[in-house]
Image (cartoon, grey):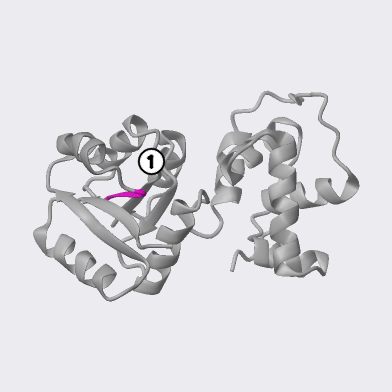
Amino acid sequence: MGRIRCVLGDRSVFFTEGLRAILRQSSVATIIGTTQYPEDVPALVGRTQPDVVLVSFEPPPASLALARVIPDVPVLVLTWSRREDDLLDALRAGATGFLHKEVEPDDLLRAIEAVAAGRTAFPPGWERLLVSRLDGHRPPGHRLQDPVTLTQRERDIVQLIVDGHSNKALAAALGIAHQTAKNHVRHVMAKLRVTSRVQLVAWALERGYVPTQTAATA
């Protein structure tokens, strides 16, 4: 498999060249196009057909607006912001990932690989943050019902994801192999007809699941 083809939008030439140099030293990804102007990103994506769109315009709303209008290519937002509201706005906008610009190069490369493969790349604990914020807007006693029936093991997996467990932490909690945990999560998501952990957590919240503990997401 060749390098992951990325386009980058950022107003800073210094940041753009630094990121280009990091990717050039790896075998994971390469930048095939850049722009300093948010309004030019959609056209650049249309011309180059990248695998991943990296947007790091400040303040974050400039990047999040692009996540809303580029639905067919995963968008990874890079920002200096550590505000929870910006992270939640990224989830609502449909971004596939949200990382701080101080991220280590290896972590950035792993995030690019993840979003290119259809997974998400958000900071640890985002599931619990989503649940805690959405739970406050749920009417008392509100609990949706639908025909989907989960086994006890599947319910346990859903609860662990609501608690913020990564696949690695989920595997440790259930005493199973990491790959087995990943397979279980994929199966549950397919059964629920969701395509991301964000959607799975939202599904669970609407059906009465609540976070029960603080879980490591390493």
In the rendered view, tell whether residue 150 sits above or below residue 128: above
Which residue occupies the foreground of this view, 211 or 179? 179
Q: Residue at x 85, y 39 (%)?
A: 150
Horizontal and vertical percent position of residue 158: 74, 47
Q: Secondary structure at mark 1?
A: loop
Q: Residue at x 29, y 34 (%)?
A: 65
Placement of the C terminus among the 4 image quadrants: bottom right
Asked whether residue 53 is drawn in magenta, I would say yes
For disc 1, the marked residue is 73
Query: On the picture, is 195 further left or further right than 209?
Result: left
| Magenta residues, start to end | 51-55
Which residue occupies the foreground of this view, 193 or 208? 193
In the rendered view, tell whether residue 140 sits above or below residue 133: above
Asked whether residue 26 is drawn in magenta, I would say no
> Residue pushed farthest right?
152
Q: Residue at x 22, y 54 (%)?
A: 32
